[in-house]
Amino acid sequence: MNSLTDIPIMARALQLARRGRYSCMPNPHVGCVLVRDGEVIGEGYTRPAGGNHAEIEALQAAGNAQGATAYVTLEPCSHQGKTGPCADALVNAGVVRVVAAMTDPNPEVAGQGLSRLRAAGIAVECGVLENEARALNPGFIARMSRGRGRVRAKLAMSLDGRTAMASGESRWITSAAARQDVQRLRAGSCAVLTGSGTVLSDNCALTVRPAELALPPEEADLASLRQPLRVVLDSRLQTPSDARVLAGDGPTYLCHSAAVSASTALRATGASFLALPQGEGGLAFAPLFSFLAEQQCNEILVESGPRLAGALLQAGYLDELIVYMAPALLGSRARPLLQLPLDAMADKVPLTFVDVRTVGRDLRFTAIPGHPEPDGQAH
């Protein structure tokens, strides 16, 4: 085969990988297609944690993969985790060629899977639709390469940049379609981070509600199997024991100052507790994100008020902002989008838009901090 043939088949593998975007965390989203004599004989994508990886799903679907070419969106793993090495499974199945979109950033793999395939006499190519494959797993790549996952803040505002009335009233600025979109953001996240102020004012649950995802049935069913980890920054442990964020199926961590102890009522909720040192203006962010990396959190979604979101942006921890803008005005007395105490134009925070689209009657802006490079690529 040649690259003109490889590209459409790898595109199909990428399409398959997206089916696991709400279910396979902390594993990366991976798709695999097996082809023999120009015919697809097996397909698969990575299942929920502890289940089959994409290669195993495709091999099982094929039954007999002798002499086939495997197209995989990520280098086949070479280490023993909850499942066996996929590189060995491909060798044992008699596959004669493997086309990978990208190498695995996991230091436990990092080229070793491809080397194992080559050592077994299998022809290996890597780099087909690599940019598209990397775009599938930004959080996983970030966690493996820098030691913490991707952090995104979800914000909703009016046309005049306000998020709530002076009283705190904020329901609902945006449309039902935007809130449905947020449900999909949650479903694709490993953890949802908020502050105690948001919990006290909104009594938010921060759970995924599968019926509101508007996904194909198979993806919705898979999404219903897991809830993201809920993380509340609550230095003084003010969260009420009957707060919705402590109820439901999803696990919850209350992060607090080491000088504060949880009440008997809070401990009875079954929540977990994480003592953090004090940072500038609140709990320290670095140990928090190190902890979330230890919990294998690839994607962290921030759903908070302007104070926490602003602090994360100023501290350099926000990788992306997702802002829903409603066609409405809340007026000059309403609360701002972010708490950013800037005084001079030189202090402004530059952003680069990477996506703008309509969601229902609202606009959704996706931006990353920083100026674009001359070629249009953000740094």
Image: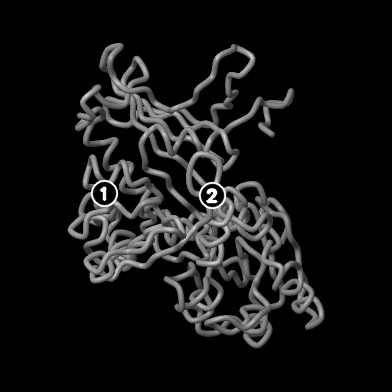
Of the 4 image quadrants, the one containing the C terminus is top right
Q: Amino acid at mark 2?
A: Ala
Q: Residue 341: x percent and y percent?
A: 50, 22
Q: Residues within 10 Å of mark 1 (few under 14, many from 20)?
A: some
Quadrant housing residue 261: bottom left
- Which residue lies at the image location 61% right of the left edge and 58% below the top edge? 143
In the displayed structure, 76 sits above or below 339; it is below
Name the one closer to the observer, 50 or 122: 50
Q: How far separated are the C-alphas under marks 1 and 2?
A: 37 Å
Residue sitting at 33 percent across and 66 percent down?
Answer: 251
Residue at 22 percent of width and 62 percent of height: 247
In the rendered structure, the answer to whether residue 9 lies left or right of residue 356 reads right
Query: Disc 2 marks which residue?
Result: 284
Spot the residue most to the bottom.
Answer: 92
Picture disc at residue 214 = 1
Element carrying mark 1: loop
